[in-house]
Image (cartoon, grey):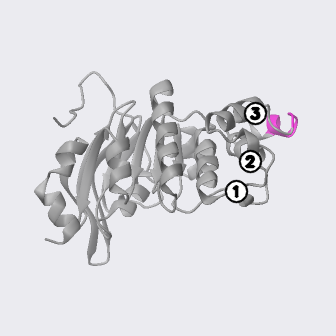
Amino acid sequence: MTMQPQAHIKPVLSVHNISKQFGGIRAVNNVSFDVLPGEILGLIGPNGSGKSTLFNCILGQLRPTEGHCAIKGRATDGVRPADLSLMGVGRTFQQLSVFPKMSVLDNVILAGQEHEGTMFSRLFSKGDAGLTSKAEQLIDFFRLTPYRNTEAGSLSYGQQKLVDAAMAFMAGPDIVLLDEPAGGVNLTMLGYLKDRLTTYNREHGTTFVVIEHNMEFVMSLCTRIIVLAQGEVIAEGTPDQIRSNQMVIDAYLGG
């Protein structure tokens, strides 16, 4: 059965009646859902279904034409990325956000520095803002220790995706939004990435929302899936329910 929000559990993310219009095109139309603590939610749909537009509305990068989004009850409309991060939101990007000429360790440290104290206190603190130990724990968790001092740009694309994930977790976020984490990653690394994400979710209770084209990855990772087509929700349920839903099959096959 589809997971229903429980009255006594407050959602980490709430999306209420979101619509986004560009001129005469309604890219997202009246989309609503909640994401509960510890949930792994997949957001899928064919090209042009409105996934990225909805994601950007959630992250405050686009202002919805109608409706609103909230993280732990606080509206995200117009919130700067740095402030969103301070609200407990981590994210990975479709395009890698690593700094290729910096070491893996320095990349991960840099991702956490903005959360440590005030600008004044950081000016007079250690160069790593005291984050080396925490960064090394994440590097070890993602099995990147052999590459600790290696320039991130020299790693394989899949390894760089792991660095990107470690950076997203440096601030100890309550919710992480992953934008096509499987894109360009080979099958071996993909299985490893899924294992690390599910393990982190189990050990820390971190909530995930995943936009992805790779259906098998989503089906094996997520506990609940929402399907968009032409800007609207056409299905919601467990992976097994989505896999057998005729509306979803038709949307992907153009039926």
Q: In the rendering, at what x and y percent does residue 18 appear? A: 29, 55
Looking at the rendered structure, the kind of residue marked 3 is Leu
> 232 or 149, which is in the foreground?
149
Which residue sits furthest front? 188
- Check disc 1 and report its element: helix, strand or loop: loop
Label 2, label 1: how far apart the Cα atoms are: 9 Å
Magenta stretch in the rendered image? 120-126
Q: Residue at x 31, y 56 (%)?
A: 44
- Check disc 2 and report its element: helix, strand or loop: helix
Q: In the rendering, at what x and y percent does residue 225 appear? A: 28, 46
Residue 117 in view of the camera: no
Q: Which residue is mark 2?
A: 104
Q: Quadrant of the N terminus?
A: top left
Q: Which mark is residue 52?
A: none
Foreground tag (1 vs 3):
1
- Residue 71 image-quadrant placement: top left
Q: Residues within 10 Å of mark 2 (few under 14, many from 20)?
A: many
Q: Which residue is mark 3?
A: 131
Q: Are marks 2 and 1 in contact (CB under 8 Å)?
A: yes
Q: Which residue is mark 1?
A: 155
Chain-order first, disc 1 or disc 3:
3
